[in-house]
Image (cartoon, helix red, strand yellow):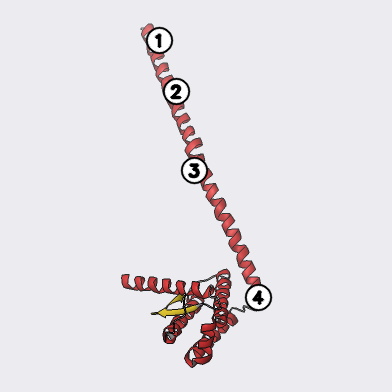
Amino acid sequence: MYLYVKMNTILKNKMENNVDILLNLKKGDILISNRGLLMKQDDFVQVDSNLEIEYALFFTFTELLGQGLFDDLNYLKYDQLIKNIDRCIDNVFNNTQLNNMIETDENIHNIIDHIEDLFDTMKDKLFYYSPFFNIINKTNNFYLYIMDILKENNYYITKVSAIYQNTYLTDRVCDDSDDLDDSDDLDDSEDDSEDLDDKKIQ
């Protein structure tokens, strides 16, 4: 179990690093990869790393697409995920190095085509380009907004309730206790008075 969680963490960190690089990839950036981890290189050095970059791209996009298939996402998160994938794909094609690899390397070309097909399928299943998706997305956003308001109100109501219990109810208990003490004192006083009257009669 520990190994499974550790591996998941390592893969998640690797994916997040790659997504960050692809989201901010510029036309002239040079990429290298090591065991699926993308890295930017300041100066161009001719390195035969096509296979490494191919694996990194395949790993990153399949992980992103997997979030849409297996994770419990609401429509707002789906919208953000689709926008991120779309931007990553655009940056891949706009980057001089990667675009050249796609045009000259058949394997990478096929992988990118496959990724785009999977991406289109995901969007079709969500009706992403239809008014239906926008309506559901806006409705969901409104629902989340209302839930946040209710949660915030519940927080303040809980605090007010706690203050009420700690002040008013505590004071009430103290007052009741004092009344009981006074009543006991009064009863004792009346008993003493009756004893004195009895002695006088005797």
Judge by depth and name the residue closer to the eye, 174 or 84: 84
Q: Cα distance, mark 2 to mark 1?
A: 23 Å
Residue at image mark 2: 182
Whole-percent x and y of residue 165? 49, 40
Between 171 and 92, the residue placed more toward the observer is 92
Q: Residue at x 62, y 70 (%)?
A: 137
- Residue sticking out furthest to the left: 2
Q: What element carries label 1?
A: helix
- The span from disc 2 to disc 4 (Cα, nearest Å) is 72 Å
Q: Residue 62, relative to residue 186: is it above or below?
A: below
Q: Which-is-in-front pick, marks 3 and 2? A: 3
Crowding at label 3, few (<14), some or many (≥20) Cα neighbours within 10 Å? few
Task: Report which residue position mark 1 lands on.
Answer: 197
Q: Residue 148: x percent and y percent?
A: 57, 57
Q: Earlier in the sequence, mark 3 or mark 2?
A: 3
> In this figure, which residue is indicated by the disc labeled 4?
132
